[in-house]
Each structure stands twice: as structure tokens, then as C-alpha cells.
Amino acid sequence: MDARPTKLKLIGQERLRIEWSDATKREYTIGQLRDACPCATCREKRRAEPPPPTELPVLSPAETAPLRILSMKPVGSYAYSIQFSDGHNTGIYTLEHLRQLGTEVEE
Ligand SMILES: [Zn+2]
């Protein structure tokens, strides 16, 4: 995989667009990126049994506020870490992973 991001751009508050060096452009919703967080905690959460339907999750105010990306930082030359507005920033998104997420867009 040699394509690299050449441009990271937020579209409004809810979507991220990445332009790649091979001229591919992909768009991601913030929620999708957050749900795909590859950190150990989130992987553990996704594996856990869903709570019984009579139990509602207790959400912190940060979890109910609309999710935003506050920043993205390169990690070495192979990945990005994303700082989300809910305070989560431990996910390391490899370039390969980012190429699998989102939807390719024209233009
Ligand atoms: Zn995570």
C-alpha cells in the first residue's frame, strides 16, 4: 500500500474527507470512524455481550453530545491517531484501515 493521504478535510462537522496520493478521495462519517476505533478498549467493548433490552446504557454528557473530530495526528508514516470530541484518542488508524473505511467519492 503506497497511497498516502495528501489532504485531510472536515466537511461540515460530521464528515471527514481524505484525499490520497493516488487521486482517490474517500469520505467518512465521524460516527463510523469512532465505531471502527481499533484500540483495545473499543475492540473489547464491541466483543462484549449487548446489555439486556431492559437496561439502558448510562451515557455521559460527552457521549450524548454530537461527535466531532478535534484533530488528527500522523503516527510514524503508517497511521493516524484521531482525537474525538468525546475525549477518546487512543485509536491508531492505519492507512490500510482508512482505505477500507468510508466511501469513495468522485470530484
Ligand atoms: Zn478506541
Image (cartoon, helix red, strand yellow):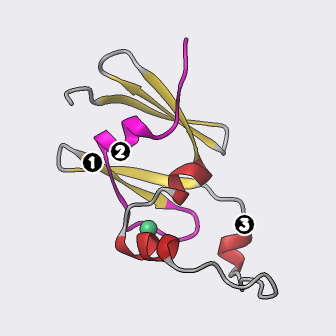
Element class at badge 2: helix
Mark 3 nearby-residue class (10 Å; few <14, some 14–19, many ≥20): few
Mark 1 belongs to which amino acid?
Ala
Place of residue 83 in the rendered image (x, y in percent of width and height, measured from the top left): 45, 60
Place of residue 22 in the rendered image (x, y in percent of width and height, measured from the top left): 31, 17
- If you read the primary sequence from the N terminus, does the residue marked by circle 1 or circle 3 appear first? 3
Above-or-below relation of 104 to 95:
above
Residue under label 1, please give it: 79
Inter-mark Cα distance, 1 to 2: 9 Å
- Is 63 placed left or right of 93 in the picture? right
Mark 2 belongs to which amino acid?
His
Q: Quadrant of ligand 1?
A: bottom left
Place of residue 20 in the rendered image (x, y in percent of width and height, measured from the top left): 35, 24
Report the residue at 61% width, 53% height from top.
Answer: 31
Q: Is mark 2 within 8 Å of ligand 1?
A: no
Residue at the extreme right: 54
Query: On the rendered image, what quadrant is the N terminus found in?
Result: top left
Q: Nearer the viewer, mark 1 or mark 2?
A: 2
Above-or-below relation of 60 to 104:
below
Residue under label 2, please give it: 97
Residue under label 3, please give it: 65
Report the residue at 82% width, 87% height from top.
Answer: 54
Any magenta on residue 38? no
Above-or-below relation of 39 to 2:
below
Q: Which residues are magenta?
A: 84-107
